[in-house]
Amino acid sequence: MMSGTIHGLSWFPQFPDKFVTWGQEIKLYERTQHDDNRRSALPNIAANFLATETRYQYARCVQPSYHKSRPIIAVGLGDGKVGICDFHETVDNSWEFTPRQQRMCLCLAWNEFDPNVLAIGHDRHRSDSCIAIWDIERGVPKDAVSFFGHSESAQSMCWDKNRRVLIAGVSQKQIKLFDLKQGNTTCQSIQTKMVHGLAVAPNGNYLCSYLDSVIMLWDLRLLDHPLKTIQSGKNHLQLSWCPTRTSLLTSLQRESPFITLYDIRSVDAESSREVYHVKRQLQPFQAKYYNTNKPPTLTSLSWHNNDYERALLLSEQGNILEIRLPLSLLTTYSNHKKLPLLPQRPLTIANSPTRQNSSQSNSSTSITCSSTLNSALNFEILDHSLTKEDLVEETYQRALSDYGLKTDLHVDSLPLTPYLKSVWLTLGNLYREERLTGLKSVLGINLGHTSEALMASSRIESRVLQWPDFINSNNLVCYRSEQRDVALKLCGWGNESDLERFVNGLCDNKEFSRAAMICVFHLKIVFACDMLSKAADLSRNSKDPHDASMFRIAAIALSSFNADRCNSTWRNQRSNANKQIQDAHLRAIFSFLTTENDNFDAVLTEEGISLADRVAFACKYLSESKLSDYVKQLIQKSIENGDLNGLLLTGESLDGINILQAYLDLTSDVQTVALIAINYFHREHFTDNRIQYWISSYLDDLNSWGLWEKRAELDIKIENLRTGTRTTRSVFLSCNFCGKSVSNALQEDVRMRSATTNINKLSSCPSCRKPLPRCSLCLLHMGTTLNISLPSDATHESLGWQSKPFSKWFSWCQTCRHGGHTEHMMQWFKQNSECPVSSCSCRCFDMDGTLPNDIADYS
């Protein structure tokens, strides 16, 4: 954790390993290849401190230049002074610009193609210009500066990538384009309040800006009107384009822990200027970076100029983090075949690293993914054979299979990995009495002095287990209580009376080594030998001589275990043989048999055994204090490794949420974590922002794939989980002027009038009497009810969507907001592509993933 005095950071565009931070001090760092944070100048990434700039403190804005010779920055101060720094001890006062009238420096912008040209933006002064263009190569500022924007203020600036044009947002009301080749008098202006955060896309065609919570997208080739308006829930703090992806616009929002990603796409890349966007959100800081349960707020982001989708992030607490975008955010689906993606490949492929470690990098400036091992988003996909498309396709196929929607579906019928099948079976076994209660609560661990803890710790019995008669050995002590019996059942072991049935079931599933291990843990040595012999016979018949010989040798060794059990020679042979035994259950058998002084660490730390089996073993053989320490250790390890099996211990709790977040950080599988939370976590946990983020992200995925029915089913499932009773109406029509409900009046109107009435008109809002919208085709008002025959026993409560066929409902375009009766709109778009409103050229149906000819009869 840093001091919290850092206000911003930025990569140097021409130096791939160097970046600068500013705040109380301005410091230069170099990203290194080593991964030892103890030698690093920063806590979360490997970096060396190179230099500091002592002349300027509390910088208002800092901008790294495009010079290739050495790292140079421009520093803007609160009094308006601008200094040029190269982090050398020699001070050159000619590299300072002081405005004629003192006021704050608001923005800086270096020209990418002429690195010596710097644009400076100041606050308003009635007798001075707000924009100065300084050519630092010409020396003294007074001889090398041009001025623009008299008596105005410059909120933000950027340079056009195709021409020598400066784009500036001035006076909170205009965006002006100054063509430097044409002199000071040539200026094109756009009347808009969206003057903050000006940035040009890497392809040079698009310009973005914002005001509060609204982003405006412009086409620099035709600036007659905005290309796209994007509304957000929170006010924006920073906008930036990813330099290595032409279509990716990113936003940081005020008091938000998320990076918001907007993938800008074109309806028809050749003949149309219409665009739409796919929104994603990413929470980069893992739980281990939190000071509290609340994730840290992001304050600054800087994209690397060459490395594909690599960025530096700064949190409000001063933490600096290096990230790469996770694979699942690279959306590969389009809602409609007429909506192609804009180019997604890196613009600088030669210097762009791959997402996998490579030994072929021969450039010291080309950092591969191995240099970001300490990053919070160093993603290790569980199935390394999956490509980017495979991951999205797998998630898509699961959604089609009702994954997580219908609890009565058996996991074997779903396209899941063995790991996820095991997790869902464990959760299903753990979910009892409408609650996911973890073993930590069952065993009374960390409950303090409550009655539950006293009940859990009371009546713990210890008894001595007797080895079989042919084994002369020290006796073992095992522990038992009602709570431990419950824990054993939740782990799948059951009572000792059910041992034979349980083990036979494992043999039926061909889990012979696991069955033998559990028999040995219960001191049923002869039974275990029989299991291994049976496994050897079956393996020989299946033409697998390696497994057959291994099981046969294990059976012989186990049957010869006798009074020499504690002999050091036998133990040493076991230790050496364990290195060659591939089956973890067989290793655990011999580790258990050679235990000394009740030290079961070799069994408890055998990660090849399932967590449930290890916990069940601990419940049987560990004392109360050792069991408590072991469960806490497993929970912490599950959080660190993102292992969903740890939910067996935590249940629905804060630790359980941390495990889900760690799994998401590791795999990017937002679908699984969202569905686990929906199915097994009670509504009091939904106040955690992370769960809200998982669910909203997965719902966005379903929307982007056009799986509207799956989305609706999931919404219904969430609503049923949140409230005990369903509300009679969750969606209603509201007046656009007064905001009051029109639906109640419509419902009352239908109830009171005779069903034989041909047309029942409600053309205005019953509250404010303003007119309701009309259908674009038939011109009838929204809310006009057509002739409907209702059952005679229909009540006021039963009148809902059944009171009107779907074809008579109103639907509208989410882009232009024009619409009408669904039936009329379908008929129109079977023959036309543009909006039926004469003054609107929106291609409404191109925004949808369904063709009009494929629409079923909704009436």
Image: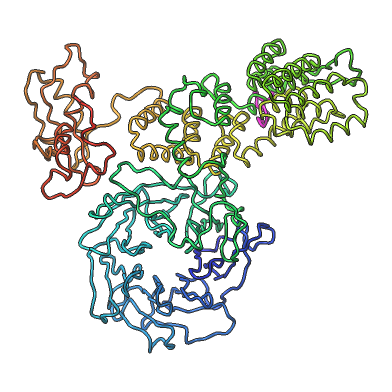
Query: Residue 781 occupies which quadrant of the picture?
Result: top left
- Badge count: 0
Q: Nearer the viewer, residue 466 or 58?
A: 466
Query: Residue 395 occupies which quadrant of the picture?
Result: top left
| Quadrant of the image containing the C terminus | top left
| Quadrant of the image containing the N terminus | bottom right
What is the image's colouring? rainbow
- Is residue 102 left or right of 383 when viewed as pictured? left
Q: Position of residue 350 (x, y in %)?
A: 49, 63
Q: Nearer the viewer, residue 149 or 265?
A: 265
Which residue appears at 35% of the width and 64% of the height? 200
Q: Position of residue 148 (x, y in %)?
A: 29, 78
Q: Is residue 745 visible?
A: no
Q: Nearer the viewer, residue 305 or 135?
A: 305
- Is residue 364 left or right of 253 when viewed as pictured? right
Q: Is residue 161 visible?
A: yes
Query: Residue 594 occupies which quadrant of the picture?
Result: top right
Q: Position of residue 206 (x, y in %)?
A: 31, 61
Q: Position of residue 21 (x, y in %)?
A: 53, 66
Predominant secondary structure, magenta span: loop
Q: In the rendered view, would you say 263 is above or below 734? A: below
Is residue 755 found inside the magenta-colored segment of the image? no
Q: In the rendered view, would you say 756 is above or below 583? A: above
Which residue appears at 49% of the width and 29% of the height? 415
Which residue appears at 40% of the width and 79% of the height? 117
Magenta segment boundaries in residue numbering: 444-454
Which residue appears at 67% of the width and 19% of the height? 493
Q: In the rendered view, would you say 796 is above or below 712? A: above
